[in-house]
């Protein structure tokens, strides 16, 4: 499945946050979106999630009427998405809201909990999970709704080393399961080895879209130049 963006722009209070972005995303690939704070990474993900207004066009697959039908957004802080008093309740909450029957809910919930290695914790209180487990639970709760694309917004920023590794392992599994993964991140070394593409956004515009190693190198060169010029 392919999701295409054509000349996407976003403005707030006469400030251009995204500027004529044209690119595409496919299921079965991991795309890391990099750039400085305020460059537009999170805004791009929110456009893809159908959370904000934009100018331009999102070209959807046949039979899809709204981009939110095929995307699922996971926030930086997993606790903002925890609703249930147990891991199981948290996963089925969204399924209950869309009116699935009990059998289908059980099938989906068991699948995502097994996939993300949370099945043994299904009766646990989510607030007592580790950071990595909480983030995997947030991903599982969205994944249960069966989006084709997962939008991960700085999902490792608040995690320790073990938590980061748990999330990376989960992302790789999701790719293997055929999902499209789009990650806004500052964790260049963490995700670059597993990414198929890198989109580098600078001041709201895409300045690179291609090989992750090349994109990371370009970004680091700019950061180094800016640091050097300030030091002088």
Image (spheres, grey):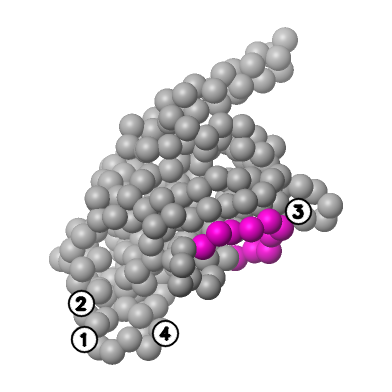
Could you tell me how far apart the alpha carbons at marks 1 and 4 are, in whole angstroms?
Answer: 15 Å
Q: Quadrant of the C terminus?
A: top right
Q: Is residue 189 above or below residue 179?
A: above
Q: Residue 94 in the image: x percent, y percent? A: 39, 78
Q: Secondary structure at mark 1?
A: helix
Residue occupying image coordinates x 64% and y 45%:
21
Under circle 2, the secondary element is: helix
Mark earlier in primary sequence (3, 2): 3
Q: Is residue 178 left or right of residue 198?
A: left
Q: Nearer the viewer, residue 55 or 173?
A: 55
Magenta stretch in the rendered image: 51-60
Magenta residue check for 197:
no
Identify the mark nearer the N-term, 3 or 1.
Answer: 3
Instruction: Specify whether residue 91 is in view.
Output: yes
Q: CA distance from mark 4 to mark 3?
A: 32 Å
Between residue 218 and residue 156, name the one nearer to us.
218
Q: Is disc 2 in contact with disc 1, using a CB cutoff of under 8 Å?
A: yes
Left or right: residue 218 versus residue 165 is right
- The dot on residue 97 is 4
Kindly report the distance in space between the C-alpha atoms of the residues bearing marks 2 and 4: 16 Å
Image mark for residue 107: 2
Cβ atoms at labels 2 and 4 below 8 Å apart: no
54 inside magenta stretch: yes
Expressed as whole percent of the image width and height from the top left, the position of residue 80 reads: 48, 65
**Distance Cα–Cα, label 3 vs label 1:** 44 Å
For disc 1, the marked residue is: 103
Residue at 52% in and 35% down: 209
Left or right of 32? Residue 28 is left
> Exactly how many numbered labels are in the figure?
4
Q: Quadrant of residue 200?
A: top right
Residue found at x 25% / y 66%? 112
Front of the two marks 4 and 3: 3
């Amino acid at each position: 499945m392919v999701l295409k963006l054509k000349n996407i722009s976003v403005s707030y209070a006469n400030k251009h946050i995204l500027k004529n972005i044209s690119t595409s995303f496919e299921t079965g690939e991991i795309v890391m979106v990099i750039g400085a704070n305020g460059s537009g990474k999170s805004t791009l993900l929110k456009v893809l999630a159908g959370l904000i207004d934009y100018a331009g066009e999102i070209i959807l697959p046949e039979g899809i009427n709204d981009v939110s039908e095929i995307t699922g957004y996971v926030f930086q802080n997993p606790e903002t998405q925890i609703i249930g008093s147990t891991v199981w309740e948290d996963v089925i909450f969204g399924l209950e809201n869309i009116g699935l029957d009990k059998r289908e809910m059980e099938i989906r919930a068991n699948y995502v909990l097994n996939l993300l290695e949370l099945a043994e914790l299904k009766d646990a209180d989510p607030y007592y999970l580790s950071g990595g487990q909480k983030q995997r639970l947030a991903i599982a709760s969205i994944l249960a709704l069966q989006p084709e694309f997962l939008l991960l917004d700085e999902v490792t920023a608040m995690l320790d080393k073990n938590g980061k590794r748990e999330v990376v392992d989960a992302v790789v599994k999701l790719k293997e399961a055929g999902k499209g993964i789009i990650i806004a991140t500052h964790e260049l070394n963490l995700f670059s080895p597993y990414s198929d593409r890198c989109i580098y956004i600078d001041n709201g515009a895409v300045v690179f879209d291609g090989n992750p190693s090349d994109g990371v190198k370009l970004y680091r060169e700019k950061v180094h130049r800016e640091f050097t010029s300030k030091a002088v």
